[in-house]
Amino acid sequence: MHTMHPKGELMEIPEMYHIRRTFVDDSILDPESDVFEKIAACGLDIKNGDRIAVTVGSRGIADLQALVRGSVRALRDLGAKPFIIPAMGSHGGGTAEGQEEVIAGYGITEKEVGAPVISSMDVVELDAPDLENRVYMDKHAWESDGVLLINRVKPHTDFHGRWESGLLKMSVIGLGKHRLASEIHSYNIRGLKELIEPTARFLIGTGKIKGGVAVVENSYDKICLVEVAAPDNIPDTDARLLEIAREKMPRLPFSEIDVLIIDFMGKDISGCGIDTNVIGRLGIAGEEEPEEPKIGSILVTDLTDASHGNAIGVGLADVTTRRLFEKIDFNASKENVVTSSFLGRGKIPVIADTDMEGIHIALRAAGCRNIKEARICRIHSTLELSDMLVSPALRSAVAGFESTEVLMDTHALADKDGNLVKFPGS
């Protein structure tokens, strides 16, 4: 494989080494039974005949179908009549049909989980005179007898604090549909940092929220912890599990990279398509960027099918491919990025016709004059960081890493047509 030197002559791109990092695998083997038993044991205030709305978001939570099915079974065992509501702010193009399609892509249908899906963008406004912001809730949830929240607890991609992504956020940004998501985001980053927590406490105080299923994933993107919290315990549960999630979250093992190649981005991978905690880029005006990793340029080559064309976060990369560009649903992407107010994340990077051209552009942008010393890293996505391909310049650093092995001598980056070869194990 070759690329162009800044002066014009061809340079050979070195073949890559496949490395694998080993993490602690504390995955729960049967999430459906686990959540069923914990809901049954929690003593939630749910009465026989209660209609209970169960929230399902747009994130690609591991074993989501099993979690929802187990929750539905447990609610039915308590005598309740559960139904599913998509709870994802402006995602799915901000339409009822789009949001139902998103969760159907995760296998959340009446046939698969045993409860009907009621998807609507209708909301009711709640009287909250002590809050700075207006408050809304999904109309069907508000008219039900109660709500069971389900969400993954993890570090947020926009900010850091005591509460980030979890049950509190689901009760506000998710359950409030497009109206409340837009309201909170209209305060820009301050809305996320300062308004979600008091708004969530207000919603809990209405008595409508009956409990929450909080999930933590390990470094293998598998569920390792499920807790069911009664309403009053939701804030403390969110804060405590966030610290656990932060410790278990995998990161790139290198503090400096010239070119990072990301095969796939998407809403099922991260709320903003590419996890900012992994790449060290927030892309939010006025917010201080993380100190590391320092990455010269980022190439993202494809968009997951589960994103349904929503390419929010593509602006975090410097280069992309025509393949990804042609998959973008610009209406869905615009709806999401405008609602978030972080417009830079929706900008289109330089478009390469092939993966190889994208690598060429990224190397040039990173100022890599000596290709043999270029620090290149290729990952499948920011959600999967156990396997990666690295150039010789990074491979030399692997010897000092614990629980890391080189699986093969060398691995080509691209084929003769300039397209990335299949990622190992994918």
Image (cartoon, rainbow, N blue to C red):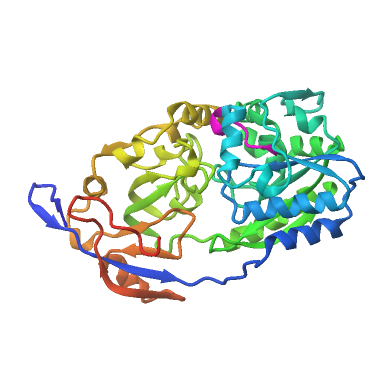
As displayed, is residue 321 above or below residue 244? above
Q: Quadrant of the C terminus?
A: bottom left
Left or right of 125, for residue 420: left
Left or right of 348, for residue 410: left
In which quarter of the view is residue 377 placed? bottom left
As displayed, is residue 226 above or below residue 163? below
Left or right of 54, for residue 371: left
Specify the segment rendered in magenta. 85-93
User: Among all residues in the image, which is located at the extreme left?
Assistant: 9
Q: Is residue 298 magenta?
A: no
As displayed, is residue 149 above or below residue 285? below
In which quarter of the view is residue 374 placed? bottom left
Q: Is residue 91 magenta?
A: yes
- Residue 197 visible in the snapshot: yes
User: Among all residues in the image, which is located at the extreme right?
Assistant: 48
User: Among all residues in the image, which is located at the extreme front?
Assistant: 111
Which residue is located at x 43 percent, y 53 percent? 381
Left or right of 59, for residue 137: right
Which residue is located at x 39 percent, y 32 percent? 347
Q: Nearer the viewer, residue 378 or 149?
A: 149
Q: Position of residue 409 (x, y in %)?
A: 27, 74
Q: Nearer the viewer, residue 309 or 300?
A: 309
Q: Quadrant of the N terminus?
A: bottom left
Which residue is located at x 8 percent, y 47 percent? 8
Q: Position of residue 65 (x, y in %)?
A: 64, 51
Which residue is located at x 56 percent, y 39 percent? 102
- Residue 321 visible in the snapshot: no
Q: Position of residue 342 (x, y in %)?
A: 50, 32
